[in-house]
């Protein structure tokens, strides 16, 4: 499918739609986060990705209200890292995030389990609490993050909502996570890519620089475009107003098949991860 605009969307398994490009606010300082989100919305982003762990959900909510945009025009994701001891207590923890972002009668567009690290019982508790939130309309869609094949398959035994609507994982040329990526696509699960620009650690990689020069684009823009053309939903993060705008300026060029292959050739498997490669077995 052509990717022509920042307003382009992908269909989630439940027929909701997610904008192709998201704006990440990973640990963006509270006094900075509101301004960064407002800048992102001003240049056209309609998708913001936060989490309880980032400690800035309330600031994302403040930016939403200050932007003047109708709530249904901005797709907001948040995440929960660990269960709270029971399904009811975990549900209350989820609802607290929703209220920070959207107020007492609000909702989020997507709520994810942030990590697979809480074990089988913890993952079950988290998913069942998310299903309740989803059923009540406080989360339009629900999904997971950093889940491998075995974790998503585990959900089948008890889940009322399966497959998860999204799996958000680390993805870039050096960490392509091909097993879980292929599994998600086979099962209709949207794949979101965090750290798509590798926190600029690879900005001087000779192959990446060579590709960027061919298109007269920055290395960050090439990496974002690469993710888009892989049918991932990239979530670049920056607090620089200039880079916020530049990271959205990726819809006026198309990487050739040869250049996609060249970037694909950089894959280092799990060794290429800077945050986490999932466990599939």
Image: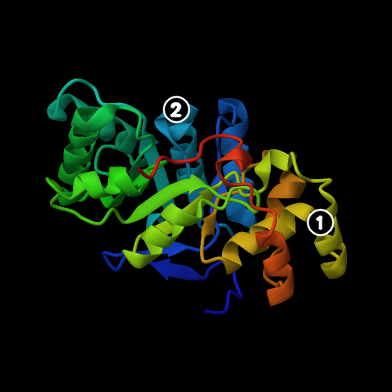
Please rate how many residues cluster around mark 1, counting C-alpha atoms within 10 Å: few if below 14, some from 14 to 19, many from 20: some
Quadrant of residue 133 within the rendered picture: top left
At 44% across and 39% down in the image, what residue appears? Answer: 61
Residue 150 in picture, x, y percent from top left: 30, 45
Question: Between marks 1 and 2, how big is the CA–CA gap?
Answer: 34 Å
What residue does disc 2 label? 53
**Which quadrant: the C terminus?**
top left
Quadrant of residue 17 within the rendered picture: bottom left
Residue 151 in picture, x, y percent from top left: 30, 42
In the picture as drawn, the residue positioned furthest to the bottom comes out as 2
- Does residue 69 appear in the picture of this structure? no
Residue nearest the observer in this picture, 191 or 241? 191
At 42% across and 41% down in the image, what residue appears? Answer: 146
Residue nearest the observer in this picture, 194 or 177? 177
- Count of numbered marks: 2
Chain-order first, disc 1 or disc 2: 2
């Amino acid at each position: 499918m052509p990717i022509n605009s920042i307003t382009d969307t992908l269909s989630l398994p439940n027929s909701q739609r997610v904008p192709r490009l998201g704006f990440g606010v990973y640990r963006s300082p509270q006094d900075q986060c509101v301004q960064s989100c407002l800048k992102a919305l001003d240049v056209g982003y309609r998708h913001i990705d936060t989490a309880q762990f980032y400690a800035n959900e309330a600031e994302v909510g403040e930016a939403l209200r200050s932007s003047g945009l109708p709530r249904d025009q901005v797709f907001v994701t948040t995440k929960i890292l660990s269960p709270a001891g029971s399904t009811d207590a975990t549900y209350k923890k989820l609802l607290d995030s929703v209220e920070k972002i959207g107020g007492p009668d609000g909702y989020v567009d997507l709520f994810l389990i942030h990590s697979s690290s809480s074990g089988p019982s913890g993952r079950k508790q988290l998913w069942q609490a998310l299903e309740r939130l989803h059923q009540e309309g406080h989360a339009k869609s629900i999904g997971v993050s950093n889940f491998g094949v075995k974790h998503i398959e585990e959900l089948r035994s008890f889940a009322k909502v399966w497959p998860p609507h999204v799996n958000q994982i680390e993805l870039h040329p050096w960490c392509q996570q091909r097993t879980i990526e292929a599994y998600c696509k086979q099962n209709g699960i949207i794949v979101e890519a965090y750290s798509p620009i590798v926190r600029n650690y690879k900005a001087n990689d000779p192959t990446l620089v060579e590709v960027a020069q061919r298109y007269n684009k920055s290395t960050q823009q090439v990496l974002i475009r690469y993710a888009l053309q892989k049918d991932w939903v990239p979530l670049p993060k920056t607090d620089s107003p200039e880079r916020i705008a530049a990271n959205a300026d990726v819809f006026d060029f198309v990487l050739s098949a040869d250049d996609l292959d060249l970037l694909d050739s950089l894959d280092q498997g799990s060794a290429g991860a800077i945050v986490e490669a999932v466990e599939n077995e």
